[in-house]
Image (tube, helix red, strand yellow):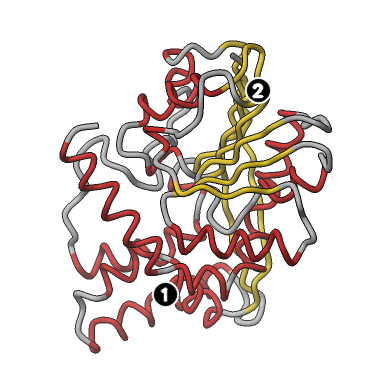
Amino acid sequence: MDAQSEQIRDQQKDSWNKFSAGWKKWDELTMRFLKPFGDEMINLIKPKDGEVILDIATGTGEPGLSIAAMIPNGKVILTDLADEMLKIAADNAANGGLKNVETAVSDVSALPFADNTFDAVSCRMGFMFFPEMDLAAKEIMRVLKPGGRLATAVWNVPEKNFWVTAIMSAINKNMQLPPPPAGAPGMFRCAQPGTMANLLKQAGAKSIQEKEMDERLFIGTADIYWNLHLEVGAPIVAALGKADDELKAKIKKEVFETLHQRYAPDNVFLDYSATIIYGEK
């Protein structure tokens, strides 16, 4: 990994650790939000009891914890760059009575495991943030056993993810933020069809499948929407941190107006879409 990638990785680690309290606070809602994608990933890799499975970029523990509950005689290792997120995952495992879960702070570009260790690997909403995605894919393939299964999920195009564009559009319109460099880590970096399939193919994966999933989750009010994003959305908080109180209030007003053009005031939803990708070694 080059120096620039290492710098990005370290910034990401600091950011995820900083926002871990927000993720813990909103864990029930965010896990319901992401559950359909995790369920489909599990359906694709078909965990079998006795297997050893790796969940990368686990955050607060899913879908790894759901997998662990399915394979009581197997083992699931949860990895993440941020140790504070892994502490939440470990607490969730303990609260769920799961004895077959281990955690390991780990950079996906240098996984601390031997070749051919895991029967399956899951990685939900991680790839688009990895500084060097090709290296991450190669590392995942390295630690998979021959015939091992991989499932990952990445965000679809912005037009299908109103749940985040409603707020980011207002921020960008009012603050004229410079666009990120081409290929830089970000939510929609892997959104174009075939991006992940090509990446995994180059890393040696076969039997690759892609599936688009469109979902909707009721959350209630624009206030809940706003507070959620301000407590878990690091890029959003970073952008709004550069705005004075007057501009921040203007952006908030516009976000609420945007939401209420689509939803009734007490009937706000999160509309979102992702691509699920499966492959084998």
The residue where tag 1 is placed is: 230
Residue 274: mark in rendering: none
Is 48 on the left or on the right of 248, as rendered? Answer: right
Say what amino acid the circle numbered 1 marks.
Leu
Q: Secondary structure at mark 1?
A: helix
Q: Secondary structure at mark 2?
A: strand
Question: Relative to the observer, which residue lies in front, 268 or 179?
Answer: 179
Say what amino acid the circle numbered 2 marks.
Arg
Dividing the image into 4 quarters, which one contains the C terminus? Answer: top right
Label 1 crowd bin: few (<14), some (14–19), many (20+), radius 10 Å:
some
- Tell me the residue at 57%/18% (across/down): 116
| For the residues bearing labels 1 and 2, Cβ distance under 8 angstroms | no
Q: Is residue 278 above or below residue 53?
A: above
Label 2 crowd bin: few (<14), some (14–19), many (20+), radius 10 Å:
many
The residue where tag 2 is placed is: 149
Is 190 on the left or on the right of 78, as rendered? Answer: left
**Who comes first in sequence, dot 1 or dot 2?**
2
- Tell me the residue at 81%/39% (across/down): 71
Dividing the image into 4 quarters, which one contains the N terminus? Answer: top left
Query: Which is more foreground, mark 1 or mark 2?
Result: 2
- Tell me the residue at 77%/36% (across/down): 74
